[in-house]
Each structure stands twice: as structure tokens, then as C-alpha cells.
Image (cartoon, grey):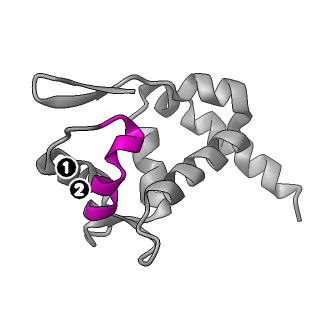
Amino acid sequence: MASSRNGGVVFEDFFPAMVDKLGQEGFMKELCNGFHLLMDKEKGVITFESLKENAALLGLQGISDEEIMCMVREGDMDGDQALNEMEFCTLMFRLSPALMENSKEMLEEAIVSTEFDY
């Protein structure tokens, strides 16, 4: 899933294939499952410590503390040095160029599908 090149972490973008296979709802459910797998169970957010503890689950054995902290900072929108579920999902979309291209259509489909759920 990840490899180190020139001192950084490079991710292969499997998300578009996952959306094709699982559908948008299934993909979002898998992102949420990923969040819950990585989060600190007591705090309910992904912290530096919980990400470091679970780095091997992501194929990131040997990642440096600095790289882990950069990952948390990249997604931390509210400045609490942790990722809540929305920040995590937003970060995952931002890390996938193909998903960013299709995000407007996905959002519109999600809005339309929820309009009829009431």
C-alpha cells in the first residue's frame, strides 16, 4: 500500500477502484471502518499515538515519528492535533486525485439519495 521514496511516504491510489467495486455508500462505510480501526478508543479520534501504534496495519512499518505527525497535521482542520472522523475522511479524499475529480458528482448523488430517505 505504501512505500518510502526519497524519505517520504507514497501511496498508491486504490480508492477509485474501491468506489467502483463497493459503490459510494460502501466506500464511505469502509472509510469509517478504517477510521475506527486507527482511532484511540478512549478519545474517539486518531491521535499521533494511535496512528503510530497502528502504522503496521497501513503497511507503514518503520515510518518515522515526524512522518506520522505530518500525516496528523495534514488532516487536522480544527487544530486539536488529532483527526476526527470527518477530518479523516476529508484527508482520504484529498490524498486521492481521482476521487477529488469525482467528489462533486459523489456529493450531488449523496444529497439526492438522502432527499428521499425522509
Q: Which mark is residue 40?
A: none
Query: Residue 92 lies in what quarter of the image?
Result: top left
**Camera-side residue of 1 and 25:** 1
Quadrant (top left, top right, bottom left, bottom right) of the C terminus: bottom right
The answer to whether mark 2 and mark 1 are in CB contact below 8 A is yes
Q: Is residue 92 left or right of residue 8?
A: right
Residue 1 position, x and y percent, is 40, 27
Q: Name the residue under label 1.
A: 70
Q: Is residue 104 above or below residue 118?
A: above
The stretch of residues the image draws in magenta is: 49-60
Residue 63 position, x and y percent, is 20, 40
Residue at x 26% of width, y 61% of height: 48
**Camera-side residue of 1 and 108:** 1
Labels in figure, total: 2
Secondary structure beneath dot 1 equals: helix
Q: In this view, does 60 lie above or below 80?
A: above
Q: Mark 2 points at which residue?
A: 73
Residue at x 58% of width, y 53% of height: 32
Dominant SS type (magenta): helix
Query: Residue 81 lies in what quarter of the image?
Result: bottom left
Q: In this view, does 44 lie above or below 86?
A: below
Is residue 52 in the magenta section?
yes
Q: In this view, does 2 lie to the left or right of 17?
A: left
Q: Which amino acid does label 1 sit on?
A: Cys
Q: What residue type is labelled 2?
A: Arg
Residue 107 position, x and y percent, is 63, 44
Q: Residues within 10 Å of mark 1 (few under 14, many from 20)?
A: few
